[in-house]
Image (tube, helix red, strand yellow):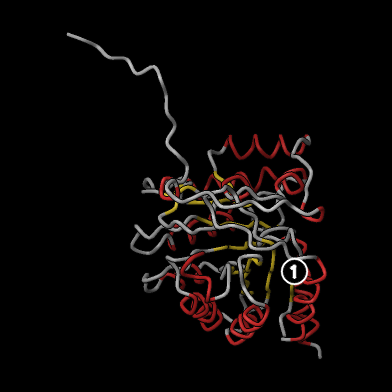
């Protein structure tokens, strides 16, 4: 009998669905997009708490440029339902494949990590789980309830997938009463086929609108990336679409290309253009706008939530 030992370990590629795509050019980053490397003591402590609870974060999985700043302050965005997404968006660095089963203890682990980090505002997001009959809506609701029980003073923001073809999913999440319901459009509709092929633009708009119909007290939020080949007039139309759905908060940030196999950066949008988008969005009626090259959905989420509440209160007294 012959025994063959495999002494060479070949790791599974992170993005096998992108492996055959041609490499795209990588534009040199301008000075305004550079950040410090994450080396602080606070970063190490946050990393240890996340690992001790067996959790994933979008900060790591999506290669967020703000991870050093946020983790230094012990602020992490938890990514529930595993680290493997059922979709293969051209911009995203989260790995694609068939996810494993849900961990029923995960909501408690998220709540415990939130308590240990001392978060006053927590953001919970997830991979897309098209394999689940509710898209993971009940798992989101369980996580919200665990947070309410373990961290009653912490405000909760969820950043959900679109729950495409999952009837009743938004109702399940809204019934758990998060303080903020976020769902990102990511880009303008003309770019969906190449950037976000598994999603449908107007379904995402309708999801945000449906949240407001169910519970008008919940803040709604959405975000996009620029630099993917969109035109300015398309961004302005997207703002109008979101305001038609009564969305309260808009974030706009620069797209950064994770690897040469991902969608290329068409251009780096200068800071003054972001300021122009911000001014226009406020003029269109958003309560809160965050627009800058390094803006991300959960960056400064706690401070932004306080400003969002203040803006609603000020509007009520007019």
Instruction: Say how many tags the image has.
Output: 1
Where residue 156 appears, as percent x and y from the top left, is: 63, 61
Question: Where does label 1 land, which residue?
Answer: 290
Which residue is painted at 66% across and 50% down in the image?
A: 64
Q: Is residue 216 above or below residue 5?
A: below
Where residue 187 appears, as percent x and y from the top left, is: 58, 70
Instruction: Point out the residue furthest to the left here.
Output: 1
Q: Quadrant of the C terminus?
A: bottom right
Could you say which quadrant of the image residue 231 lies in?
A: bottom right
Could you say which quadrant of the image residue 292 lies in?
A: bottom right
Tell me the element at label 1. strand
Q: Is residue 51 above or below residue 288?
A: above
Could you say which quadrant of the image residue 255 lies in?
A: bottom right
| Residue toward you, 216 or 96 | 96
Q: Quadrant of the N terminus?
A: top left
| Residue toward you, 133 or 88 | 88
Q: Is residue 98 above or below residue 220?
A: above
Which residue is painted at 40% across and 62% down in the image?
A: 135
Sort mark 1 into few (<14), some (14-19) or many (20+) by Cα contacts within 10 Å: many
Q: Relative to 107, is 237 on the left or the right?
A: right
Q: Is residue 65 above or below residue 164?
A: above
Q: Relative to 71, is 207 on the left or the right?
A: left
Where residue 163 appears, as percent x and y from the top left, is: 43, 68
Instruction: Point out the residue furthest to the top here.
Output: 1
Where residue 211 appears, as percent x and y from the top left, is: 53, 77
| Residue toward you, 8 or 309 | 8
Which residue is painted at 42% across and 65% down in the image?
A: 198
| Residue toward you, 231 or 92 | 231
């Amino acid at each position: 009998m012959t025994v063959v030992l495999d002494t060479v370990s070949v790791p599974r590629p992170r993005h096998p669905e992108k492996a055959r795509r041609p490499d795209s050019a990588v534009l040199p980053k301008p000075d305004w997009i550079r950040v410090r490397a994450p080396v602080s003591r606070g970063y190490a402590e946050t990393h240890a708490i996340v690992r001790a609870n067996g959790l994933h974060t979008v900060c790591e999985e999506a290669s967020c440029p703000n991870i050093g700043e946020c983790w230094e302050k012990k602020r992490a965005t938890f990514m529930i339902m595993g680290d493997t997404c059922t979709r293969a968006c051209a911009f995203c660095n989260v790995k694609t494949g068939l996810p494993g089963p849900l961990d029923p203890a995960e909501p408690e682990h998220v709540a415990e990590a939130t308590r240990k980090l001392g978060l006053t505002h927590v953001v919970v997001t997830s991979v897309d789980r098209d394999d689940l009959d509710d898209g993971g809506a009940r798992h989101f609701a369980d996580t919200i309830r665990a947070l309410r029980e373990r961290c009653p003073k912490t405000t909760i923001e969820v950043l959900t997938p679109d729950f495409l073809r999952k009837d009743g999913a938004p109702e399940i999440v809204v019934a758990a009463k998060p303080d903020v319901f976020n769902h990102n459009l990511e880009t303008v509709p003309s770019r969906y086929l190449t950037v976000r092929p598994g999603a449908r633009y107007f379904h995402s708009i309708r999801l945000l609108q449906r949240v407001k119909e169910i519970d008008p007290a919940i803040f709604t939020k959405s975000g996009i990336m620029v630099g993917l080949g969109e035109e300015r007039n398309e961004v302005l139309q997207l703002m109008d679409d979101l305001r038609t759905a009564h969305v309260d908060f808009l974030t706009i940030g620069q797209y950064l290309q994770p690897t040469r196999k991902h969608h290329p950066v068409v251009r780096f949008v200068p800071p003054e253009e972001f300021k122009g988008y911000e001014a226009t969005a406020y003029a269109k009626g958003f309560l809160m706008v965050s627009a800058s090259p390094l803006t991300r959905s959960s960056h400064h989420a706690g401070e932004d939530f306080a400003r969002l509440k203040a803006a609603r209160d000020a509007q009520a007294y007019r």
